[in-house]
Image (cartoon, rainbow, N blue to C red):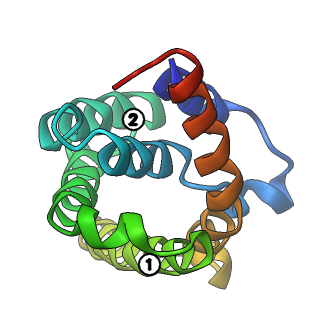
Amino acid sequence: MSFLIAYMLMAMPLPAWAANWRPAWVAIVLIYWCLALPERVGVGIAWVAGMFLDVQQGTLFGQNAIVLIIIAFVILKLHKRIRVYPLAQQALIICGLLLITQLLTLWIRAMMGFPPQHWTYWMPAFTSMVLWPWLFIILRDVRRTFRVY
């Protein structure tokens, strides 16, 4: 259900000035579930989530899938370390990871002939970083309420 809400938030229309500031909802929800349930949510879920995101956004088929696979792989490799960090430090790690994946997306889009038009291309990583503590708390409470283990 959390992924469905993330897809709806990604599809929600925003004003033109705010479109580039949209957080990477699907990516940060994937990060949460990879941290919370690493044995149940992994690279396969990331691939499926990325393919759905490619279809939803009309991007190159596989572009978001490879980005989400990289995110899931890194989080799964480091989940024991990241889980013990305070939320502010987790947010910084997530911002760095999202900046790296945006660089990969930029490279893919540049090879296709679509370079970014403005510096706000990098803003989703920072808005995701700001929203991470609240998203973490909300999803943790939902997970505990519904006893998802």
- Residue 35, given in percent of the width and then of the height, sits at 34, 51
Along the line of sight, which residue is nearer the eye, 115 or 27? 27
Q: Amino acid at mark 1?
A: Ile
Tell me which residue sits at (16%, 37%) in the image. Answer: 39
Disc 1 from disc 2: Cα separation = 23 Å
Badge nearest the viewer, 1 or 2: 1
In screen coordinates, is 86 left or right of 60? right
In screen coordinates, is 46 left or right of 92? left
* Other-residue count near label 2 (Cα within 10 Å), few / some / many at <14 / 14–19 / ≥20: many
In the picture, residue 101 is in which quadrant? bottom left
Along the line of sight, which residue is nearer the eye, 53 or 73? 73
Along the line of sight, which residue is nearer the eye, 51 or 90? 90
Determine whether the residue tagged by mark 2 lies in a helix, strand or loop. Answer: helix
In the picture, residue 36 is in which quadrant? top left
In screen coordinates, is 78 left or right of 11? left
Residue named by callout 2:
53
Determine whether the residue tagged by mark 1 lies in a helix, strand or loop. Answer: helix
- Residue 38, given in percent of the width and then of the height, sits at 22, 44
Residue named by callout 1:
93
Q: Is residue 108 above or below residue 3?
A: below
Quadrant in which the C terminus appears: top left
* Other-residue count near label 1 (Cα within 10 Å), few / some / many at <14 / 14–19 / ≥20: some
- Residue 110, given in percent of the width and then of the height, sits at 32, 74
Query: Tag on residue 3?
Result: none
Tell me which residue sits at (24%, 40%) in the image. Answer: 46
The answer to whether residue 114 of the structure is visible from this angle is: no
- Residue 12, given in percent of the width and then of the height, sits at 72, 32
Disc with the residue nearer the chain's start (1 vs 2): 2
Tell me which residue sits at (71%, 52%) in the image. Answer: 134
Q: Amino acid at mark 2?
A: Leu
